[in-house]
Image (spheres, rainbow, N blue to C red):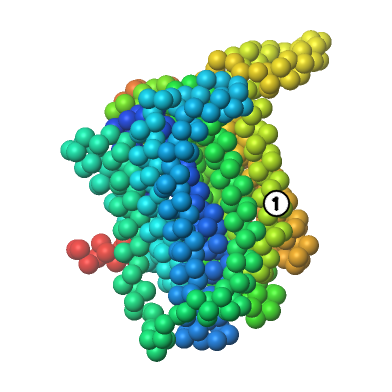
């Protein structure tokens, strides 16, 4: 029932967008490496990002698209357009007020971050944003506050067009955002010598472009409602506006909690080695590649249909769209998870290995990537499950699942970063256990394990000196989404019985098994070529990555003939269609 042609079209544009996103981060890596200066940029933009994510981004899928969908199908274009104007004005006003307040409070906020002794004691370490960073942090913070203003309007335009199922332009907007940031960053940093300030200004330019790209199509579809003005009284008395707020509020709280996680992770990263936050950010962007392309594409296309079938009380169609969306996303996501796990080092080298980004940065980023990859499946499925809740006009239950995830991440961020900071202490114990098991000498295994668990409590509550401590941030994030997926699944079935063993769990487990087989085969191919090639040269790293990936994808495709026959038939049709187009193109050229 889900429109696969729309999904693949959106996926293709998101793929190009993500490539540009990697190119953008590669420019950052080339110009600054995983440096303290770049860490300041990430930290300074945290609050502006939170403003946009909490007030606007969190509301779009949870409330705005479902409310606008109901208005379009129940009352027609005129009222649909009018409600769109009302909601846009209200949310932009709130965003603007908060931005202005934050702009004037920026010196006090910056001063607290630089000088607050409680933050030092809370983190049990020397806080690495010092007095010398005050001016840079303050300027970046204020520049970053401009982005939410433009992005808030752009997000509502995106919602309007997606309700009308115009996905092409809405997915082009972030593509042009990344392109604008790449060009502007390079010009401002290289030619105007603005350092990281250039990245901040480039982000504002990108947010303007994000809006301008969508305006022509909005004008085409939008028709004025007889030119009548919208009054404050009309907005205040409109029940749909208040309904949008009621639906959006739980999601705002959930996003605020998620962003609080981001702040905690940012603070903790500054207690680690220099560049830890940047290494984590680089890895985080990489692991989002399949989520942003596949998960986002499927969720975007599914939400308007889920909202429509919920509005019309067509439970069978709702259930089919939801399960088709989950199975399609898992089928496409699993092989990318396998590739990122096995080829994490060469992938990081190929994407970021340039300029100031050295081998130590590569190892640290690859370590984070391996642990973040675990979260990809959870994040993908959660995206779709949340859309199902929103389509059902139920935004409180997802908040419970999100809260569970937040608690796990907060606990894990503290305990696991400490644990991994003792990496060189506990690794020998595990190696000893594995060696004894391999040699079938179990006499000392229990005593070694007992010692390990006794020491573990000490390692989790004290800070060691290993730079791999940043892996604790990645692993806690992954565990939080795994738990969130389980809780969201259980709660959705309490609201409406739409997920089952036969239609959801069993097909997913078969796909997972196919991925495990793919990983084992890829590992042996990778090791075989790794020993034979000089991987200090980029061309050989590229060959190693390409050969191993192609083998893995072929293995997964053949395996899906057994484990996922329906998806295999879909893939076979797409391959045949591409072959036909290639042959037709060759005939024309001849």
168 or 90, which is in the foreground?
A: 90
Is 573 on the left or on the right of 533, as rendered? Answer: right
Q: Which residue is at 68% across, 34% downward?
A: 411
Q: Where's the N terminus, which quadrant?
A: bottom right
In the rendered image, which residue does mark 1 sit on? 401
Name above or below for residue 533 compared with residue 298: above
Name above or below for residue 415 compared with residue 336: above
Residue 20 appears in the picture as rendered: no
436 or 65, which is in the foreground?
A: 65
In x, y percent, where is residue 195?
A: 28, 34
Q: Please, what secondary structure does the residue beneath circle 1 have? A: helix
Name above or below for residue 98 compared with residue 415: below
165 or 254, which is in the foreground?
A: 254
201 or 463, which is in the foreground?
A: 201
Q: Which residue is at 52% across, 80% downward?
A: 234
In x, y percent, where is residue 447?
A: 80, 11
Q: Give the crowd class for mark 1: few <14, some 14-19, many >=20 residues within 10 Å.
A: many
Q: Which residue is at 51% across, 24% downward?
A: 127
In x, y percent, where is residue 91?
A: 49, 65
Name above or below for residue 96 compared with residue 35: below
Q: Which residue is at 76% across, 62% downward?
A: 493
Q: Residue furthest bottom?
A: 226
Residue 264 appears in the picture as rendered: yes
């Amino acid at each position: 029932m889900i429109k696969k042609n729309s999904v693949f079209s959106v996926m293709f544009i998101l793929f190009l967008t993500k490539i540009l996103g990697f190119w953008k981060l590669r420019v950052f890596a080339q110009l600054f490496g995983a440096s303290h200066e770049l860490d300041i940029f990430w930290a300074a933009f945290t609050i502006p990002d939170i403003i946009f994510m909490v007030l606007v981004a969190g509301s779009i899928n949870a409330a705005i698209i479902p409310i606008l969908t109901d208005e379009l199908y129940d009352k027609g274009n005129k009222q649909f357009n009018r409600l769109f104007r009302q909601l846009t004005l209200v949310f932009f006003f709130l965003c603007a007020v908060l931005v202005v307040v934050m702009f004037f409070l920026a010196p006090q906020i910056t001063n607290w971050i630089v000088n607050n002794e409680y933050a030092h004691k809370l983190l049990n370490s020397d806080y690495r944003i010092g007095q010398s960073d005050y001016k840079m942090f303050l300027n970046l913070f204020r520049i970053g506050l401009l982005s939410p203003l433009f992005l808030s309007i752009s997000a509502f335009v995106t919602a309007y067009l997606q309700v009308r199922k115009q996905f092409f332009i809405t997915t082009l907007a972030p593509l042009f955002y990344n392109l604008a940031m790449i060009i502007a960053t390079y010009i401002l940093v290289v030619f105007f010598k603005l350092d990281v300030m250039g990245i901040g200004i480039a982000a504002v330019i990108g947010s303007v472009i994000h809006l301008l790209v969508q305006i022509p199509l909005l004008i085409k579809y939008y028709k004025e409602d007889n030119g009548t003005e919208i009054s404050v009284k009309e907005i205040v008395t409109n029940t749909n506006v208040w309904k949008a707020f009621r639906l959006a509020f739980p999601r705002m709280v959930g996003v605020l909690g998620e962003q609080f996680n981001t702040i905690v992770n940012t603070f903790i990263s500054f207690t680690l080695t220099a560049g830890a936050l940047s290494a984590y950010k680089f890895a985080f962007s990489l692991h989002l590649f399949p989520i942003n392309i596949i998960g986002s594409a499927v969720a975007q296309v599914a939400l308007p249909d889920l909202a429509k079938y919920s509005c019309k009380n067509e439970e069978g169609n709702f259930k089919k769209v939801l399960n088709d969306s989950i199975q399609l996303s898992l089928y496409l996501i699993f092989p990318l998870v396998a590739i990122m796990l096995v080829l994490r080092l060469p992938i990081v080298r190929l994407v970021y290995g340039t300029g100031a980004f050295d081998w130590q940065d590569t190892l640290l980023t690859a370590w984070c990537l391996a642990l973040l990859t675990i979260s990809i499946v959870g994040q993908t499925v959660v995206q779709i499950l949340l859309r199902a809740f929103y389509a059902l006009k139920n935004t409180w239950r997802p908040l419970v699942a999100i809260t569970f995830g937040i608690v796990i991440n907060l606990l894990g961020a503290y305990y696991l970063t400490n644990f991994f900071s003792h990496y060189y202490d506990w690794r020998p114990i595990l190696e000893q256990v594995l060696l004894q098991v391999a040699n079938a000498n179990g006499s000392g295994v229990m005593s070694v394990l007992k010692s390990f668990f006794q020491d573990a409590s000490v390692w989790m509550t004290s800070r060691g000196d290993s730079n791999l401590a940043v892996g604790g941030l990645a692993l806690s994030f992954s565990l939080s989404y795994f738990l969130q997926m389980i809780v969201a699944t259980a709660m959705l079935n309490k609201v409406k019985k739409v997920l089952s063993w036969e239609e959801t769990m069993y097909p997913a487990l078969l796909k997972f098994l196919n991925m495990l087989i793919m990983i084992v085969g890829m590992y042996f191919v990778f090791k075989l070529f790794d020993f034979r090639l000089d991987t200090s040269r980029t061309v050989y790293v590229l060959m190693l990555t390409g050969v191993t990936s192609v083998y893995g994808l072929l293995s997964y495709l053949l395996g899906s003939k057994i484990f996922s026959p329906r998806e295999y038939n879909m893939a076979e049709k797409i391959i045949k269609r591409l072959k036909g187009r290639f042959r037709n193109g060759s005939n024309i050229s001849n």
